[in-house]
Image (cartoon, grey):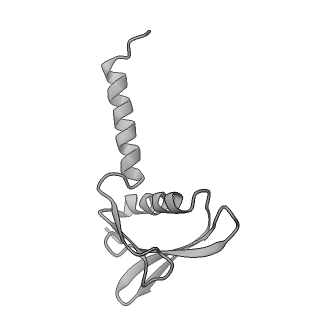
Amino acid sequence: MKKIGRPFVLMIAFVITTSLALAGGQGVSYSGGDGTTMAKAVVINGATESTGLDAEDAWLAKHFRGYELRQQSLLNSKGKMYDAMDITTQDGKKMTVYFDITGFFGK
């Protein structure tokens, strides 16, 4: 069996760590509701504007495997910012999922 060098192992660890961070794995958490309405929006905590969209995608992929994004809209309501994601689920159901992005919008 061929021995794997330390630089290669470190590179793989970096790629895995970076992927987890971008997918909402490190520093990002979710709270709030199930996203079916603005009042029940999924709140994304610990994201930045650059990682927030990846966090939304990770949440959607976990809850709606095989979904297709049709449209994304930015909404402002009662001093909070939301992303409204119009998706089609794998079984063809069309729905909107709301994310509260107030914590990272513009940051």
- Where does the image place residue 43, in percent across and percent down from the top left? 37, 72
Q: Is residue 69 left or right of residue 83?
A: right
In the rendered image, the vertical position of residue 5 relative to residue 76, given as above or below: above
Q: Which residue is painted at 29% across and 63% down in the image?
A: 46
- Where does the image place residue 83, in percent across and percent down from the top left? 47, 74
The quarter of the displayed image where residue 99 is located: bottom left
Q: In which quarter of the image is the C terminus?
A: bottom left
Q: Which residue is painted at 65% across and 73% down in the image?
A: 94
Q: How many labels does the image show?
A: 0
Q: Quadrant of the N terminus?
A: top left
Q: In this view, does 96 lie to the left or right of 43?
A: right
- Where does the image place residue 2, in percent across and percent down from the top left? 43, 10
Which one is in front, 79 or 95?
A: 95
Residue lying at the far bottom of the rendered structure: 78
- Where does the image place residue 50, in percent across and percent down from the top left? 39, 59
Q: Which residue is painted at 56% across and 62% down in the image?
A: 64
Q: Which residue is painted at 32% across and 22% down in the image?
A: 7
Q: Is residue 77 left or right of residue 107?
A: right
In the rendered image, the vertical position of residue 6 relative to residue 72, given as above or below: above
Which one is in front, 30 or 54?
A: 30
Residue lying at the far right of the rendered structure: 92
In the rendered image, the vertical position of residue 86 relative to residue 46, given as above or below: below
In the rendered image, the vertical position of residue 67 relative to residue 6, given as above or below: below
